[in-house]
Image (cartoon, helix red, strand yellow):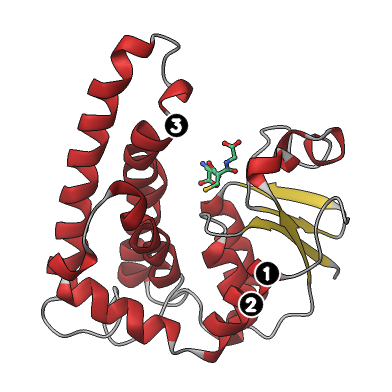
Amino acid sequence: MSLTLYFAAGSCSLPALVGLEEANADFDAVRMVLPDGDQRRPEYLAINPRGRVPALVADGVTIAENIAVLTAIAQRFPEARLLPLQDLLQLARAYELFAWFASGVHVAFAQVARPERYTSDRSAWPALAAGGRANMLAAYAEIDARLEDGRPWLLGQDFSLADPYAHVFFRWAGRLGIDTADYPAFAAHAKRLQARPAVKRALAHETSDHTLTPA
Ligand SMILES: N[C@@H](CCC(=O)N[C@@H](CS)C(=O)NCC(=O)O)C(=O)O
């Protein structure tokens, strides 16, 4: 099976990259440069008409949206144990986090960083941003509290793709002027995550030359 992941540095495509690296998958990684508008180029819109990353192309078929992409990677490489596929309750917990991350936390961040997505009325942007920031603070507190019992990973003893997904938001804290030192358990989780060889390899893709529009 041929696999190509379209991703962008510093974006929510990190867990997909981590998943493929954790699985030691044979895949091509194409780095999209969002500030340059790569996501709106016709050649990318032909792959993902929504113009967002991540997009995973498996044997010529596009899978978009993080939850679908992460599910596809975890199912394709079951031996990598990227999701607790055999444990119904733990799997439900993983999807609970995925759904909250995609439809709650990510959306709260976008209210701050991308208010134009919600309304063209600029006078509403400060209120949107304030609400988004408050929701992000609540999300950091919730993730921190979940890890406070000393568990290494969000689901407990076992790593899952919920961990690099949460790390996306940890990385975005600086863009919100939020000090991650206020969330010590989440900060320890970030350190633990970054120590994983697969995460190091995933992060290395962020500076690769494999771009949609090579110079
Ligand atoms: N619901 C989508 C959101 C994807 C998304 O918004 N990705 C951002 C990067 S974190 C993006 O591609 N932004 C480009 C843009 O908005 O132009 C998912 O969960 O995959």
Residue 214 position within the rendered picture, expressed as x and y whole percent measured from the top left: 88, 56
Residue 166 position within the rendered picture, expressed as x and y whole percent measured from the top left: 36, 63
Find disc 1 in the rendering and name its residue: 207
Q: From the viewer's perspective, is 143 left or right of 56?
A: left
Q: Distance between the residues labelled 2 and 3?
A: 26 Å
Find disc 3 in the rendering and name its residue: 114
Residue 30 position within the rendered picture, expressed as x and y whole percent measured from the top left: 77, 60
Find disc 2 in the rendering and name its residue: 204
Query: What secondary structure is found at the residue carrying circle 1?
Result: helix
Query: What secondary structure is found at the residue carrying circle 2?
Result: helix
Looking at the image, tell me whether mark 1 or mark 3 is earlier in sequence order: 3
Looking at the image, residue 94 lies above or below residue 62: below
Q: From the viewer's perspective, is 97 left or right of 51?
A: left
Q: Do the residues labelled 1 and 2 touch (CB within 8 Å)?
A: yes
Q: Which of 115 and 177 is in front in this view?
A: 177
User: For disc 3, does the CB lie below 8 Å from ligand 1?
Assistant: yes
Quarter of the view holding residue 122:
top left
Q: Distance between the residues labelled 1 and 3?
A: 24 Å
Looking at the image, residue 94 lies above or below residue 34: below
